[in-house]
């Protein structure tokens, strides 16, 4: 069983479109995250949720909106996609400071 | 500001040679330290972690890292690398919060 799963794995879309990435974890963790990895492999936290409540919101454009319908899911919706949004987005969940990552969603905006 | 520095962006090494990947973090009273590995086109996997206790921590595949508080370092070492160790390695720190701060990564390339 996959611990943290993201869909889709690849996403190619045109500028201006709206898209969503879904994330689910079956580990029973209370805390979930979204990280962005840019073309230089740099990883930066975007959001953190604890038990469906937003805990961390880094300096991210408000075109990015996370939604947590329950503590096992944290979805990421992106409005009006821009070329600079192209990256790999990783979902993660954590327990006792140890984070478990999904396989990533490679978003390409053309 | 809280930060993690990985000085080497790339480390080329021959198979069976020893390797050290360096990691330094900005000082704090309490830190948790991690090394993650990312194989090509895959997500991040936890390699090893330091939360408390013994300053030397080991992974199941022969890597080890030592927490050095005075030098604010958490270097990763392996005495003999394999081709399969070729990957991107990320050092990360948590300053007693749920937020992981990552270094910029070190690409370990093992040659036959």
Image (spheres, rainbow, N blue to C red):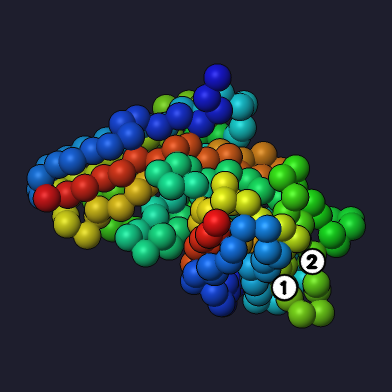
Q: Residue at x 43, y 47 (%)?
A: B40
Label 2 or label 1, whichever comes before in sequence order: 2
Is A108 situated above or below B35? Answer: above
Q: Is residue B80 visible?
A: yes
A47 relative to A81 in the view: left or right: right
Quick one: which residue is furthest to the front in this view? B112
Q: For residue A29, which quarter of the picture?
A: top right
Q: Chain of mark 1?
A: B
Query: Residue A102, position in %: x, y?
Result: 48, 37
Q: Residue at x 80, y 72 (%)?
A: B68
Q: Chain of mark 2?
A: B
* Labels 2 & 1 near each other (Cβ < 8 A): yes
Q: Which mark is residue B67?
A: 2
> Closest to the observer: B103 or A16?
B103
Q: Is residue B3 visible?
A: no
- Using the numbered discs, state the Cα–Cα distance from disc 2 to disc 1 in whole angstroms: 6 Å
Discs 2 and 1 carry the same chain letter: yes
Query: Residue B31, position in %: x, y?
Result: 73, 63
Q: Residue at x 62, y 26 (%)?
A: A28
Which element is circle 2 on? strand
Residue position marked by numbered label 1 in the rendering: B73
Which element is circle 1 on? strand
B21 relative to B66 in the view: left or right: left
Q: Residue at x 85, y 62 (%)?
A: B55
Query: Residue A82, position in %: x, y?
Result: 16, 55
The quarter of the picture where the C terminus of chain B appears is bottom right
> Closest to the observer: A32 or A5?
A5
């Amino acid at each position: 069983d996959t611990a943290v799963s993201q869909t889709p794995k690849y996403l190619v879309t045109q500028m201006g479109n709206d898209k969503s990435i879904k994330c689910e974890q079956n580990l029973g963790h209370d805390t979930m995250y979204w990280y962005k990895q840019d073309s230089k492999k740099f990883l930066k936290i975007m959001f953190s949720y604890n038990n469906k409540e937003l805990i961390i919101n880094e300096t991210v454009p408000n075109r990015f909106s996370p939604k947590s319908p329950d503590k096992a899911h944290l979805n990421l919706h992106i409005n009006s996609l821009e070329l600079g949004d192209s990256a790999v987005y990783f979902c993660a969940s954590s327990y006792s400071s140890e984070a478990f990552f999904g396989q990533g969603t490679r978003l390409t905006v053309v | 500001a809280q930060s993690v520095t990985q000085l080497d962006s790339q480390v080329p090494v021959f198979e069976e040679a020893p390797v050290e990947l360096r990691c330094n973090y900005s000082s704090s009273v309490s830190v948790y330290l991690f090394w993650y590995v990312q194989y090509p086109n895959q997500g991040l996997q936890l390699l090893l972690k330091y939360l408390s206790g013994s300053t030397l921590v080991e992974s199941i595949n022969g890597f080890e890292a030592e927490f050095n508080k005075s030098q604010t370092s958490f270097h990763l070492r392996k005495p003999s690398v394999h081709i399969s160790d070729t990957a991107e390695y990320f050092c990360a720190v948590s300053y007693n919060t749920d937020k992981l701060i990552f270094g910029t990564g070190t690409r370990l390339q093992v040659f036959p």
